[in-house]
Amino acid sequence: MRRKIILRSVIPVALIILAAIGFAVFEPIQVLPRIRLAPGYLLINQAAETITSEDVRGDIVVYNFGYSGCGDACASMNDTMREIQGRLDEVDVGDTDVRFVTVSFDSDTDTPPVLAEYAAGLGADPELWSFATGDPVHLQNVVKAGFEAYYEKRDDGTFTFDPVFILVDGWGVIRGEYRYQTSASDSDKIVHHLDILGEEIRNSHGAASLAYEAAHFFLCYP
């Protein structure tokens, strides 16, 4: 009798799992990979306010890295961030907010007033897009070690760095890294990935969450 009760309780669970796996395999579910946890940080933004990783917990965040004096080296990155900011109406992330954070590794020059002027010149929405910097040692731990974004200061005070965008979900997990230009523009790719992430956030509840977990298991990545 006990064995029958156990079997009766196990079978529905097994069917749900099989249904989820089947749905993930045969339906066009796509998910973004869970790459690793994003680093924690405490920085100062263009309004001279602290901004921490906990402040953006629950939001989807697109990060990039540079500094106000980088000129042409940052122009295309800034254009990409600005374009994504202007295309948020193309994605459905439900009740989740999408935010942007540009981290400057030139903490000596990029004071809050300088960052505020820089942000205004780019047409950044201050409600959505933060420009921030912090202690040099902390920046190295956050940018280099945590986000794995390379930069080095030259003798003349300028910086050499690798352009990169990082997409982080509301749980603080890195879901996208965009380091090299492909046939699709970075802005197109990131907007598309925001839409995929938004669909997962909206739909992965209850039994449907098993289908999304199956999609992660089977690496159903775009």
Image: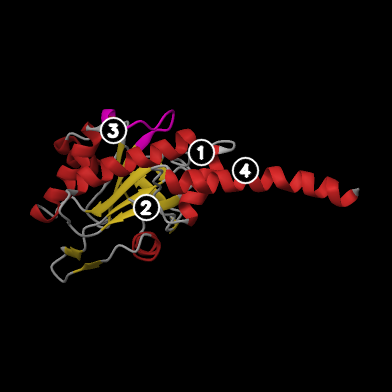
* CA gap, disc 2 and disc 3: 32 Å
* CA gap, disc 2 and disc 1: 16 Å
x, y percentage for residue 176?
Answer: 34, 53
Q: Are marks 1 and 3 in contact (CB under 8 Å)?
A: no
| Amino acid type, mark 3 | Pro
Q: Nearer the viewer, mark 4 or mark 1?
A: 4
Question: In terms of secondary structure, what is the magenta stretch mainly?
Answer: loop
User: What is the crowding at mark 2: few (fewer than 14 residues within 10 Å), some, or many (at least 20)?
Assistant: few
Tell me the element at label 4.
Answer: helix
- Of residue 87 and residue 42, the one placed in the foreground of this image is 87
Tell me the element at label 2.
Answer: loop
- Taking the magenta stretch, the answer to whether it contains residue 39 is no
Q: Which residues are magenta?
A: 89-98
Q: Residue furthest right?
A: 1
* CA gap, disc 4 and disc 1: 14 Å
| Amino acid type, mark 4 | Ile
What is the number of callouts on the image? 4
| Amino acid type, mark 2 | Tyr
Q: Earlier in the sequence, mark 2 or mark 1?
A: 1
User: What is the crowding at mark 4: few (fewer than 14 residues within 10 Å), some, or many (at least 20)?
Assistant: some
Q: Which residue is mark 2?
A: 221
x, y percentage for residue 156?
Answer: 13, 68
Q: Which residue is mark 4?
A: 16
Q: Which residue is mark 3?
A: 126
Q: Which residue is mark 1?
A: 204
Q: Earlier in the sequence, mark 4 or mark 2?
A: 4
* CA gap, disc 3 and disc 4: 45 Å
Q: Earlier in the sequence, mark 4 or mark 1?
A: 4
